[in-house]
Amino acid sequence: MTITKQKKVLGRGLDTLFPEVQKTIREETEKLVNLPLNSIELNPYQPRRSFDDEKLSEMAESIRERGVLQPILVRRATHGYQIIAGERRLRAAKMAQLASIPCLIIQADDTQSLEIALIENLQRENLNPVEEARGYDELMTKFGLTQEEISGRVGKDRSTVANSLRLLKLPPNIREDLEVGRLSPGHARALLSLESKPLQAKLWSRIIEKGLSVRQAEALAREMKEKTSEKPKAEPRPPDILELEEKFMATLGTKVQVKPSSKTSGKIVIHYNNLEDIDRILGILKIEMNH
């Protein structure tokens, strides 16, 4: 089986990506303690927003039988502690009605807290595409990191980070389908190739209704773009109108347009370049002006 470079990078873990955090963990091994569940608050920077109740119930049952086998990561908060990584274990432990949970207390600021939570979830492939994009967006908007810096911190190519952030430009209803798995990231890229929101909505409904594959969605997106880029062809003008214009132009020596508005009426437009041209045309038409 081929292992991609990305997988290798993610596999490095916190010790390589966050050596200062790993150093803190090594120095504070005595901080591995059991903490009361009611002393641990949730992390507002947790990138994961959705939790599968059925899987949490399964984890809770496992915890009842075997306990929490891996400690969660926390930091000190104003009142008690705040979770950094392991929220599923914390929620499942509460469902299992435990009184306490094993915790590793580390020092981490807000930026590190979000970065660690992102990396843990990415390594476990726990985030849906929109949650991942929101995590990157928070690192940029709240903590001022560039896409290049995020790329280095989470071990993904900059283009991957950029493409992930583009998902947030999709309308809310489409993002919701992406979050719950009705759409794949490939479908989302096909939708994003269309700049028009109405076209995106049209393609989205076709994908859902017909169950289009990513390739089919991409082909339909290309077809939609080609249709919108085509300029409407002008209807051919009747030969008798063209002939009439030629006779006017031959007689008056200037551009003349005949524009019918119905079968029996319309207008004739005579072009001129200067005042002398007007006098010349008036002379041809034998029209005298009172000066």
Image: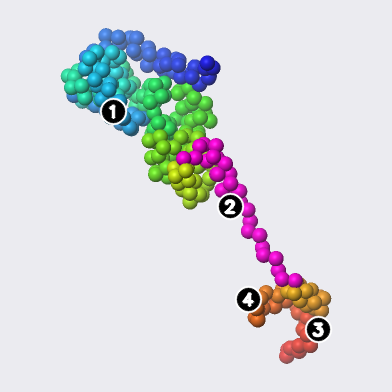
**Mark-to-mark CA distance, 1 and 2:** 45 Å
Q: Is residue 9 left or right of residue 33?
A: right
Write the start and end of the magenta stretch as one range: 211-239
Residue 29 visible within the image: yes
State which tag comes first along the sequence, 4 or 3: 4
- Numbered disc in front, either 3 or 1: 1
Left or right: residue 101 versus residue 208 is: left
Residue 91 is left or right of residue 284, and the answer is: left
Element under label 4? loop
Q: Quadrant of residue 281?
A: bottom right
The amino acid marked with disc number 2 is: Thr
Mark 4 residue type:
Ser
In whole angstroms, how far apart are the C-alphas of marks 2 and 4? 28 Å
Taking the spot 63% from the left edge, 77% from the top edge, the residue there is: 262
Residue occupying the point 50% across, 35% down: 186
Q: CA distance from mark 2 to mark 3?
A: 47 Å
Q: Earlier in the sequence, mark 2 or mark 3?
A: 2
Rounded to the nearest angstrom, the CA distance separating label 3 from label 1 is 92 Å
Chain-order first, disc 1 or disc 4? 1
Q: Where does label 4 land, which residue? A: 261
Which residue lies under the disc numbered 1?
A: 54
Q: Secondary structure at mark 1?
A: helix
Q: Is residue 214 magenta?
A: yes
State the SS at label 2. Answer: helix
Residue ID at (26%, 15%): 68
